[in-house]
Amino acid sequence: MEPLGLVVHGKAEPFSAALRSLINNPRYSDVRFVVGQEQREVFAHRCLLACRCNFFQRLLGTEPGPGVPSPVVLSTVPTEAFLAVLEFLYTNSVKLHRHSVAVTFGLGPLQERCVAFIEAHSQEALRSQGFLELSAAALLPLLRSDKLCVDEAELVRAARSWARVGAAVLERPVAEVAAPVVKELRLALLAPAELSALEEQNRQEPLIPVEQIVEAWKCHALRRGDEARGAPCRRRRGTLPREHHRFLDLSFK
């Protein structure tokens, strides 16, 4: 049996600092991105991105041809959020701000931290430009969270604002843009007067499927959350109390 070798561990801080110095550094860079509406040029390193993230592994899987490779255009990605992702990939750490939690590129640990950050700063995050720039895939885990510190009425308004921006950018109807995410809104938490107002607004500007509103009314009529299939009744951390909530079987956990 071979004798066990000695494992030598260097200091983490100099290693992290050295890698941080390569972020958006044209030196030794072999891939360029053009990011955001301002078309900012960002430099990176293919091998590091590909080994750290499946998204970039797929994106950069094709070997570049001879000459200067064309930049990868990511026009819908906020520049600050993209740089935050690079910092996490290069150094395995990043300081999150409300503008830098919009894009995670499928990075599980980073996505979890982004969701936790937004849960703790729900009011500020929902009113930020970064929230309006979220993709549907990024918005879904937020709307599924029980820990958002925001009331459902405000969350519905935020979802409508988000869908309006997406509709303008994509040139598609608001309801079509909203379809993947509005099913996570917990309409049964709204009081009858609020639900009636939402129903009227929905007639003027369709956002939520009529069937989803019907299920919320069914929850009110039956006064039992578990009887209204398709109408989530579980309260969030920031849900304001309403008289009918005492009839709901599913409370916040």
Image (tube, grey):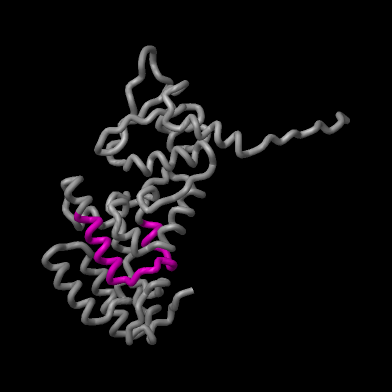
Q: Position of residue 215 (x, y in %)?
A: 28, 74
The quadrant of the picture occupied by the N terminus is top right
194 to the left or right of 106 = left
Q: Is residue 147 magenta?
A: yes
Q: Position of residue 210 (x, y in %)?
A: 21, 68
Quadrant for residue 128, please give it. bottom left
Q: Is residue 88 above or below residue 186?
A: above
Start-end of magenta stretch: 140-164
**167 up-or-down from 196: above or below:** above
Point 37% across, 51% down: residue: 138
Q: Position of residue 232 (x, y in %)?
A: 36, 72
Image: 51 above or below 237: above
Main secondary-structure element of the magenta-colored stretch: helix
Q: Residue furthest top?
A: 66
Please provide percent x and percent y for residue 147.
Answer: 44, 67
Q: Nearer the viewer, residue 134 or 39?
A: 39
- Of 14 and 183, the residue lying toward us: 14
Residue at 37% x, 75% y is: 239
